[in-house]
Amino acid sequence: MGRAETYNDLVEIMIRQVETNTTDMGPEQLEVPVGAYTDPAIWRKEMALIFHRLPLMLALSIELPKAGDYKAMEMCGKPVLITRGKDGVARAFLNVCSHRGAPVAETGSGNCSRFSCPYHGWTFASDGRLMGIAEVEKFGELDRGARGLTALPCEEKAGMIFVVLTPGVPINVEQFLGGMLDDLAYFKLETWHYQGAREIFGANWKIAYDGYLEGYHFAALHAKTLGPVFASGANHFENFGPHMRISFPEKRVPELRAFPREEWWAKEHDGYGFVRTLFPNISVALGVGVGQIAQLIPGPTADKNRTILNYITPHAPRDEAERESFDQAIQFVGDVTNDEDYALGSKIQKGLESGALESVVFGRNERGNQFFHRCVEYYTQGGVEPFPTL
Ligand code: FES
Ligand SMILES: [Fe+2]
């Protein structure tokens, strides 16, 4: 089935859900023990078996478009450096000098032909090779080939750069993303315009992630922002491996019946939108005039996360009016995420740590959350079959 047919079917489902006030439902509710959000031992297991093992989307291609561009960041306790070489290839390294361990690049982005370590001035090429040893005649020569930056598994696909935080772990993004890769490749993210990022702080990473996975909370929590526009609690969930495509119909989606069915698929954001998730920590929302790609970064402790909200637009603003409308949309989505979802998330964290509850419960309508928590369990148990089904 082609993309148009697939999406026409999805719109049909959304229209029906809104018209009949229904949603996708799983067979039963799911209880998740509170420790899943509070227990440091569980959190450490998640870091080791999920965040340090799976490919993570660490940068958009459009953040490092040119040879020599780089981005340095701290990710789940690891200092990471992503570079684009003269050959155009994106590579990732641990941002750790092979002399005595200093970071060779400051956190942030930039462009340079070589990285010069701030401690003693050794230099490294963008492909990780050790180029220069300061005062080599005093230091003594050594095997430079064995003293490059430590490479991390890295692949660039569909306008996104994926990295595994542990050296030597095999990476296969095509296999990992499955059908989600084609779904996202369609948008040609590598041709979009990078507007910038906003950093926000919140609770345990799963509390934050839970908020991206259902529209059940729109009527209450987002009563004044998203609530008036989107149908509350009307979602259709699909999965590609552990990744999800979740439909979010607007209340007006039935108006699409005025158009021929074959045209529905092209009317995304004229009545409906999707959240696409990349397990374990990315939420992609390409609607509302701008795209928001949220990168959840757990830590530094179990009760905290830092989230980078990346904003992209299909093209650079063409005039002042368009720049303003982009800026407004960015401010709006970021504020909703920070002031409503994340602010409540921090209170939820305190509530869960208070000892009031032994478990939280996900309804039959919170299917995406159920699936997400089953996926977390699957990976933290070492990937013991069967893989969860939605
Ligand atoms: S630690 Fe980098 S040059 Fe010494
Ligand atoms: Fe929300």
Image: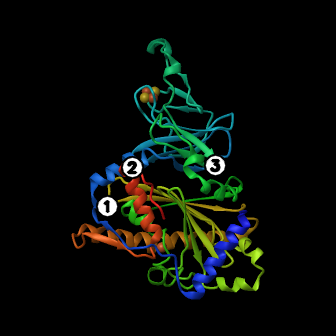
Q: Amino acid at mark 2?
A: Val
Query: Which residue does the numbered mark 3 point to in the structure image?
Result: 61
| Residue 205: quadrant of the picture | bottom left
Q: Which mark is residue 36?
A: 1
Residue lying at 47% horizontally and 55% vertically, measured from the top left: 280
Looking at the image, which is closer to me, 234 or 322? 234
- Circle nearer the N terminus (1, 2): 1
Compared with 372, 63 (above or below) is: above
Looking at the image, which is closer to me, 348 or 343? 348
Residue lying at 59% horizontally and 33% vertically, measured from the top left: 126
Q: Quadrant of ligand 1?
A: top left
**Which element type, helix, strand or loop, lies under badge 2?**
loop
Residue 76 shows in the view: no
Q: Percent x, y for residue 152? A: 50, 37
Residue 62 shows in the view: yes
Quote the CA–CA distance across marks 2 and 3: 34 Å
**Which element type, helix, strand or loop, lies under badge 3?**
helix
| Quarter of the image with the N terminus in it | bottom right
Q: Percent x, y for residue 231? A: 55, 82
Q: Percent x, y for residue 133? A: 51, 20
